[in-house]
Image (cartoon, helix red, strand yellow):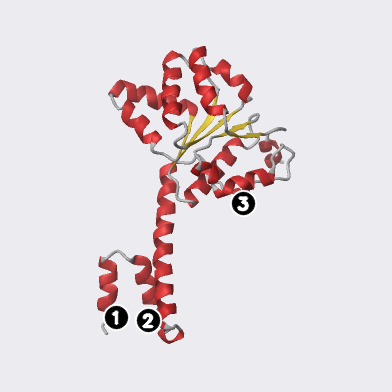
Amino acid sequence: MDINSTLEKLGKMRLQGFEKAYREITENAQQEKFTTDELIAHLVDAEFDDKYNKKLSRLVKQAKFKQQASLEQINYSHQRGLDKNYLLRLQNCDWIKKSRDLLITGSTGVGKSFIASALGFQACVHEFKVMYITANKLFDKLLLAKADGTYFKYIDAISRTQLFIIDDFGLKKLDSKQCTMMLDLIDDRHGRCSTIITSQLPVKSWYDCFVEPTIADAILDRLTNGSYRIDLQGESMRKFLRN
């Protein structure tokens, strides 16, 4: 058997995990350590892991998280009202499969963005498509898309994202155009996919973020009914990190 020919064919078929594992086995003369079934299983596992890791890297890159974060890095020692069990229940991403939303509120520096990004990364681990963006940048992009004729294309791209993270909502009051855009976005996603929204404002104050009361009612009705909530308390964690 021509091993080099086999390795070359594996490369041409882009079975890179299979190729690498098979090359290591042959170079180290380990074939005899495996039964036929074990060898096949080992090579298939290597190819599966290689494809999964590449997909995960691609999903994380496409998400454009502001910071690298994982659930394992979350600090539970500071008193900020964070329920570890509640957060760990979210890590299996069943709430995304059920197209439920998550609203994270709390004052500046308590870790809202970090938790949102950690849950976003966990969604990538479960092979969901994720997109992260700050609220201000989102509306800038939507306004630009309106101007250059790509608005519906951009909205469609967001609607096909299984988890959409809007960070720092409520820093600015939304004007009439922005209210309509927000309704388009939320209505298109409601009941179909999941959204995480973080805000310094408590959810009960979100109504005042919209200049159009009727649109505010429509948006908040969709967002608040059946959504998961994380309400963080306490002082900014940045103060503890500096000490």
Type of amino acid at the residue the image marks with label 2: Thr
Type of amino acid at the residue the image marks with label 3: Glu
Query: Which residue in the structure is indicated by mark 1?
Result: 3
Quadrant location of residue 118? top right
Q: Is residue 173 in view? A: no
Give the residue drawn at x 44%, y 40%.
162
Give the residue drawn at x 63%, y 37%.
111
The circle on residue 26 is 2
* Cα distance between the residues tagged 2 and 1: 8 Å
* Cα distance between the residues tagged 2 and 3: 37 Å
Query: Which residue in the structure is indicated by mark 3?
Result: 72
Q: Is residue 110 above or below residue 123?
A: above
Expressed as whole percent of the image width and height from the top left, the position of residue 117 reads 54, 42
Q: Is residue 210 above or below residue 223?
A: above
Give the camera-side residue of 162 and 222.
222
Q: Are the residues at dot 2 and dot 1 in contact (C-beta closer than 8 Å)?
A: yes
Q: Is residue 47 left or right of residue 200?
A: left
Disc nearer the start of the sequence (2/1): 1
Expressed as whole percent of the image width and height from the top left, the position of residue 4 reads 27, 78
